Amino acid sequence: MRIKRISVDAERLAAIVEMAGTLVQRDDRKKYALSLEFALGELVRSEMRRIAQQPHLARGRDILDLALDRVMHSVNESLRGHRLNIDLGRYATTVRDKLRFPAKEMQDLAENLAESRRVHKLGATEEIAADSGRHCIVHELGLREAIQGLLAEPTDDCHELNIDGLREKAPWRLQGEWFPYELIAEGFVFVIDDDGSVFVSTENLPPELREKASGLLRRVVDRLYA
Amino acid sequence: MISVDIRRKIITLSSHEQGLATAAYTRSAMAPEFVAAIAPRTTESRLSLSISEPTLERMVVKYSEQLVFQPLEEIRYWFTYTAGAFLEPGYPPLYYSRDRSSRVSPNKTAVCAIGEAMAGFIAQRLYQCTKLARPNHDYPDVVMESQQRTYLVEAKATLQSIEEGIESVVNGELPRLASFTSSAGQLDVRPVVGLLVGTCLVSEIQYYCYIIELQLV
């Protein structure tokens, strides 16, 4: 069984376009698509996080303004692409109001993140190529001296997840009928989510076992993304 | 591995029950009327699932807005305390030297975090939903979607007993979520479903979930 990978932000954008299309169709100003507002808010928050990870973008800028501009640009482009003429300004206004305080927190943390990276305080992020040729990104989660887990994410060109490829690999054991699946392999539990991410906990593990978890993670994603 | 016993109710709400929900939410005297009206519109089933601790940890990261680092450790520590282990060697001696009659309580933030994580997990596993949004300090806790339907998910959690604890908490929340789902259903352009997920942490390896799914007709 191959299952479509959810690219979360792309799905949210698609959901916004779909709902905007229905709003246009119904042509009813009394309708207020709460789901659209929630999806837009999440897209903007996600964009703020992306900006905050890049100190040269975040420094001296209001990340909420920047993120909202970028997201609305992208939404409006998509709407134009679908020939939908609708102003989502009132949703953007609500989202801006709701995200004011999270934006301030992110703005403060962005500087801390830049400094932590400068002194190598945090775990590393590495892009790796699997045997299948597909690339993925592996994040070490936590402080460098106490890595709590490893998280693998596929790159954007991965559109499907080969769940059966994991189910068929004895003696690995795949648990669950839907996401999040749990793969039990050599005593480790790999958590597989609908966005294709794979997490394995390495909390309190000695270095040699962490290495083993890392090696297994590569084998898991090699099958999953193939 | 944590085993999860689930009691699931599905309630279909016509405009009459939706009106009663709003009345019961704003005026508690109307609550018995609302409860009586939904009884014949309720179906019930039981099922069970399991979840590993690493998966629950990931769900906490994905769905909880609580700033809590190791909720599972916290809860395990609490169950160790309530088992009386702290009277034995190897544990801190101070937790029972209280100077008032107030009860020692578990870390509420950790309990809430696990409740939010379980709500997200149930919405994914049982309803094949994906996360649309996790609103900040807003209602409901999580917004999920599946097949162009929006699921408004509210999470509750407790360590108390099943009947007096979580079922009572969830039943108490029901008029609010029913009222909100009704409003959202009238305003939104998508079909909207309300999902109330209550989790009782019976022990460190056994949870009980009481789910109410609200369908508007």
Image (cartoon, coloured by chain):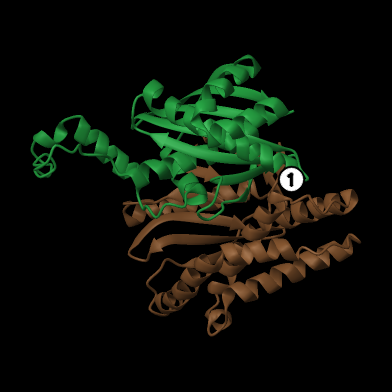
Chain colours: A brown, B green
Name the foreground residue: A139 vs A95.
A95
Q: Which residue is at a point 62% across and 58% down the rendered structure image?
A: A42
Residue found at x 63% / y 55%: A131
Q: Quadrant of residue B78?
A: top left
Q: Quadrant of residue B8?
A: top right
Residue drawn 8% across the image and 41% down it:
B97
Q: Residue at x 62, y 23 (%)?
A: B10
- Residue B106 in the figure: left or right of residue A109: left
Residue B173: image x %, image y %?
A: 50, 34
The one of A223 and B28 positioned closer to us in this rendering: B28
Q: Position of residue A170 (x, y in %)?
A: 55, 33
The chain ID associated with circle 1 is B
B30 up-or-down from A64: above or below: above
- Horizontal and vertical percent position of residue B117: 48, 42
Helix, strand or loop at label 1? It is helix
Is there any visible trace of residue A164 in the rendered image?
Answer: no
Q: Which residue is mark 1?
A: B187
